[in-house]
């Protein structure tokens, strides 16, 4: 099944999971997966959250930013920071916590898959 993100309407998700600004996403959802192309403008973020019932994989298409992740609920201040740029992939396992932050000067565009586990 071919997914053409340019033909999927953009959802504008303000302060997604408590983050800053907005996540703009072309999102396909079925009973098995949530698959999306997301865009974070400079200064935007996806808030620190847990994947209690699913994992998540995302791949950076363009731009750069950082992920703060931690496999426990001990909080963002105790998380590990990973720098990400185009071509990098991040995996958050089921039960893990993470946030994605665009701290660069250009849009951060990524592809993500959240399997419905």
Image (cartoon, rainbow, N blue to C red):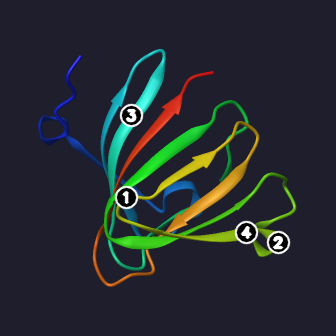
Counting residues from the start of the chain, the first of labels 1 and 2 encountered is 2
Q: Where in the figure is residue 15, as x and y percent of width and height? A: 48, 63
Secondary structure under the numbered disc 3 in the rendered image: strand
In this view, 86 is above or below 55 = below
Label 4 to label 2: alpha-carbon separation: 7 Å
Counting residues from the start of the chain, the first of labels 4 and 3 encountered is 3
In the picture of the structure, the residue carrying the numbered disc 3 is 35
Quadrant position of the N terminus in the picture: top left
Q: How many marks?
A: 4
Q: Residue furthest front?
A: 87
Q: Where in the figure is residue 35, as x and y percent of width and height? A: 38, 34
In this view, 32 is above or below 76 = above
Counting residues from the start of the chain, the first of labels 4 and 1 encountered is 4
Tag nearer the camera, 1 or 2: 1
94 left or right of 104 in image: right
Tag nearer the camera, 4 or 2: 4
The circle drawn on residue 80 is 4
Residue drawn at point x = 59 percent, y = 47 percent? 91
How dense is the environment of label 2, judged by Cα within 10 Å: few (below 14), some, or many (20 and up)?
few
Q: Where in the figure is residue 42, as x and y percent of width and height? A: 35, 78
In the picture of the structure, the residue carrying the numbered disc 2 is 78
The circle drawn on residue 116 is none
In the picture of the structure, the residue carrying the numbered disc 1 is 87
């Amino acid at each position: 099944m071919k997914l053409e993100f340019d033909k999927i309407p953009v959802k504008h998700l303000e302060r997604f999971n408590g983050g800053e600004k907005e996540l703009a996403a072309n999102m396909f959802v079925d009973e098995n997966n949530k698959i999306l192309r997301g865009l974070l403008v400079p200064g935007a973020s996806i808030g620190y959250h847990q994947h209690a019932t699913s994992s998540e994989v995302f791949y950076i298409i363009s731009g750069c930013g950082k992920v703060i992740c931690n496999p426990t609920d001990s909080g963002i201040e105790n998380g590990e920071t990973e720098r990400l740029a185009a071509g990098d992939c991040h995996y958050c396992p089921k039960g893990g916590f993470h946030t994605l932050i665009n701290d660069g000067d250009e849009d951060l565009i990524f592809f993500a898959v959240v399997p419905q586990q």
